[in-house]
Structures are given as C-alpha cells and as structure tokens.
Image (cartoon, rainbow, N blue to C red):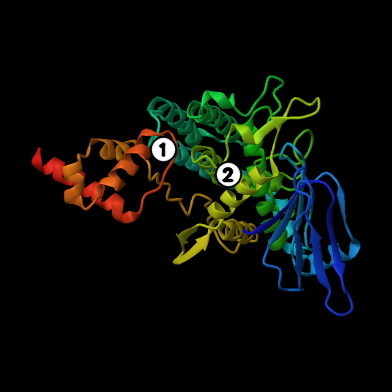
C-alpha cells in the first residue's frame, strides 16, 4: 500500500507532452499557508504509487489522465471532509462470467451464504478480541474483555444470517465500550453511534480519524475485488437491497481487517502523531475536520501497518497483499476449486513495546542493577522518563532483552 495523498483547493491531474513523453502531471491543492503546492511528474509504468487519494474540494482530472491512470492500473479514491468515501475510479476489471454467476448463485443459496458470512464474522470477532488483548497490555480492561468473550460464545449457536448479525452487533457493542475506555476524556469519544443512530459521524477527533482509516481500508478492498473480478454489489453478510449498502461485498471484505485501522488510530494518538490541536470545527456542520499534514501523518501510519509483513502459507506477505489473497480464496471457493474458507488466518502478531509490565521493570530497576545489565545512567534516566509518561514508546530489542534479564535475575534471587 503506497497511496499518493492530495488535498486542499485546486488539485490538478493531467497528461503533459502526450506525443513525446506522456507524463502524468499532478499539482497538489493549496491549503492556507501552503502557497507553493507540491508537484509530481510520472512516466508511464513508472509511478511508484498504487493509488491516489483525494480529499480536496476543488480541482480537476482530465479525461486523458483518467485514461493514463486506468492503463497503469492506478485507482483514484475521493473522500469527503468527514473521511467517508464519496467515489472511486477503478481500472477495468476482468470479465469472469463463471465467477460472477457462482457468486450470485452462492448469495441465493442459504447454506453457502451462511458458510461465507460465518467465516467473515468469526474472523472479525477473533481480530476484535486480539485488539482488546493488545490494549490490555497498557490498560486494565479485563472485565470488558470477559464480557466481549461471553457475547462471542453465541457465534457457535448461530444458524441464520440474522443470528450472525445479532452476535456481531453485540460483540461490536462490547468492543467499542472497551475501546472507548482507553481513549482520554479530552477527545470526547462516545463510540461509533451518535444519538440519531447514524454511524461514522465526525462528531469527535477519534471518529473522524476512524472514518479516514476505514475509507483507506475500503479502497484496498475495492481494489482487491476489482482485480479478482468479483461483483462488489453482491455480498453475503451485508444485504445488497433495500436500505443496506449497494457495495455489500466491499463491506463484507472489510470486516476481518478493520483491526488494521483501529490499531493504526490508537497508535497514532498514543504516540502523539495526532493530537487535539490537529482538529477543528468549521462552518455550521458541527463536525470535526483536521489539518492536511495530520491527514498525511495518518496515511503514513496506515501505510506502515498495511505494509507490515506476516507469514502465511510459507511466504511473508504484506497485509495489503493478504487482503487480495483472501479475495482470491473467496473466488476459488465460489467456483468450487477449494472446499474450505477461512478469513481468520493469518493471525496478526500484536505486541506492545510499552506494556504495563515493561514500564514496571524500567521504574523498579536500580542504577547499580542497570549498570550490571549494561544500561548507562543517561539511558536509564531516558527510559524512566518514557515509562512515567502516557505516550507510547519503542525500545530496541537489545534493551528489551536486558530488561527481561533483570526480571529473571530478580526472580532467581527471590
């Protein structure tokens, strides 16, 4: 995942020197103090970005630029000010009549649809519990994890799509209660639903940031579905008629990977990459906005998370590649080329380098003990300052191993 982020007023994308070079020429938008917007120029088949994200409010893209981007397989995603995805322009998808016919048949087959929806909900619940256990390393939310686990038990008794949605909804409620408990009060986060019952409102900085993160994830899922040749409007867990979304398969595919966005948002605020001064109200909509540079820092954080590696089927894949791989596995399941469908694997390795236990070790080690472990006095002072703060921090593997050695020595002495 390596998107090019464009924002502000006056975004321009066109093709220059079409006969001799056919360069894609991009001018970023202006935003207040930015008097000289960044410019980019890319040769055909040499663009390093795999997508373009635009959250500007004015500008243009020429028809020739759309042609250039389509031929170079670079999708364009346009976001609203609240972080929601307004529109997407994707490269032409492969025409696979047999796959789409199998997808529509499965959506109308009660047993097959239930099997696919069950795999999606099971994976989402497992990842939600993984995130809560990861949060538990910093905050005491044991009771909330227990309540979430109790709600998750009901998944084994689900027999219909309605049952699955009910279990998923109850687990999500407990999950967001736990998520809310670790967010500082100054951000005024009260969950993902506002009084009107409408989700995804940018009524506070956390919800706005989650919106942006989910929109980036949605773009990745749309791109994977488009690449494989599935029909995005025919889903299994989400309805594709009535009041539900028309892109139901996109939302289905998002569910097992929402944790990527949730963890990225927590890390962004926890580390100080995003903070309250980055957000502001404007106009009369009473919903938050945030600065261009803050949005770019968030996208950089998401890029790092999606590009992190995980071992799967004997290979090390990036999470963005995993999403496409799982979409391919869904397609193979639909046409009968594999008999099992599992969105739960691979499982992420979520670890906090600043857990409560590690902070305790840092604060209890004496100077003489630190010297014996090979930690300098200045290093110990630095570590203690970090351990006493509420901000996240990272340590080198060498330092972590030294602190673990201190714990083993203390236990042996006892």
Do we see residue 230 in this rendering? no
Q: Which residue is nearer to you in this view: 78 or 366?
A: 366
Q: Quadrant of the N terminus?
A: bottom right
Q: Residue 116, percent across and down?
A: 60, 48
27 relative position to 49: left or right: right
At a point 47% along the width and 33% down the height, the residue shown is: 152
Q: Is residue 182 above or below residue 89?
A: above
Q: Residue 348, percent across and down?
A: 46, 50
Q: Residue 101, percent across and down?
A: 75, 57
Q: Quadrant of the C terminus?
A: top left
57 relative position to 84: left or right: right
At a point 79% along the width and 69% down the height, the residue shown is: 71
Residue 189: quadrant of the picture:
top right
Labels 2 and 1: the sequence-earlier one: 1
Q: Which residue is nearer to you in this view: 112 or 148?
A: 148
At a point 47% along the width and 40% down the height, the residue shown is: 131
Q: Which residue is nearer to you in this view: 53 or 367?
A: 367
- Residue furthest to the top: 195
Do we see residue 223 in this rendering? yes
To which residue does mark 1 refer? 133
To which residue does mark 2 refer? 261
Q: CA distance from mark 2 to mark 1?
A: 16 Å
Q: Is residue 15 above or below residue 360?
A: below
């Amino acid at each position: 995942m390596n998107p090019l982020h464009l924002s502000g007023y006056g975004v321009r994308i066109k093709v220059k020197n079409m006969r001799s070079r056919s360069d894609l020429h991009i001018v970023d938008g202006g935003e207040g103090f930015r008097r000289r917007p960044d410019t980019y120029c890319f040769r055909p088949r040499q663009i390093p970005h795999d997508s373009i994200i635009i959250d500007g409010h004015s500008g243009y893209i020429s028809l020739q630029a759309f042609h250039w981007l389509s031929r170079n397989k670079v999708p364009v995603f346009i976001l609203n000010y609240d972080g929601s995805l307004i529109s997407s322009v994707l490269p032409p998808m492969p025409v696979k009549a047999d796959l789409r016919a199998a997808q529509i048949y499965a959506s109308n087959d009660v047993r097959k649809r239930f099997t696919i929806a069950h795999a999606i909900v099971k994976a989402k619940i497992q990842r939600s519990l993984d995130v809560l256990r990861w949060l538990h390393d910093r905050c005491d939310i044991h009771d909330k994890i227990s309540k979430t686990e109790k709600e998750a038990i009901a998944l084994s008794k689900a027999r219909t799509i309605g049952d699955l949605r009910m279990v998923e909804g109850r687990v999500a409620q407990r999950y967001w209660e736990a998520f809310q408990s670790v967010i500082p009060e100054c951000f005024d986060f009260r969950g993902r639903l506002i009084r009107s019952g409408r989700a995804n409102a940018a009524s506070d900085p956390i919800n706005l940031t989650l919106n942006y993160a989910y929109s980036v994830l949605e773009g990745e899922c749309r791109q994977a579905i488009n690449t494989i040749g599935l029909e995005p409007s025919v889903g299994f867990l989400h309805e594709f008629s009535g009041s539900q979304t028309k892109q139901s398969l996109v939302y289905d595919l998002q569910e097992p990977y929402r944790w990527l966005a949730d963890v990225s948002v927590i890390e962004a605020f926890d580390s100080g990459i995003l903070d309250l001064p980055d957000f502001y109200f404007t106009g009369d909509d009473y919903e938050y906005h945030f600065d261009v540079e803050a949005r770019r820092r968030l996208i950089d954080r998401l890029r790092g998370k999606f590009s992190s590696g995980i071992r799967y089927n004997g290979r090390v894949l990036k999470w963005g590649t995993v999403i496409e791989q799982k979409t391919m596995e869904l397609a193979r399941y639909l046409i009968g080329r594999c008999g099992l469908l599992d969105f739960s694997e691979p499982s992420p390795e979520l670890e906090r380098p600043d857990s409560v236990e590690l902070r305790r070790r840092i604060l209890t080690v004496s100077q003489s003990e630190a010297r014996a472990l090979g930690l300098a006095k200045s290093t110990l002072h630095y570590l203690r300052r970090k351990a006493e703060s509420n901000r996240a921090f990272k340590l080198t593997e060498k330092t972590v191993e030294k602190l673990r050695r201190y714990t083993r020595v203390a236990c042996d002495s006892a």
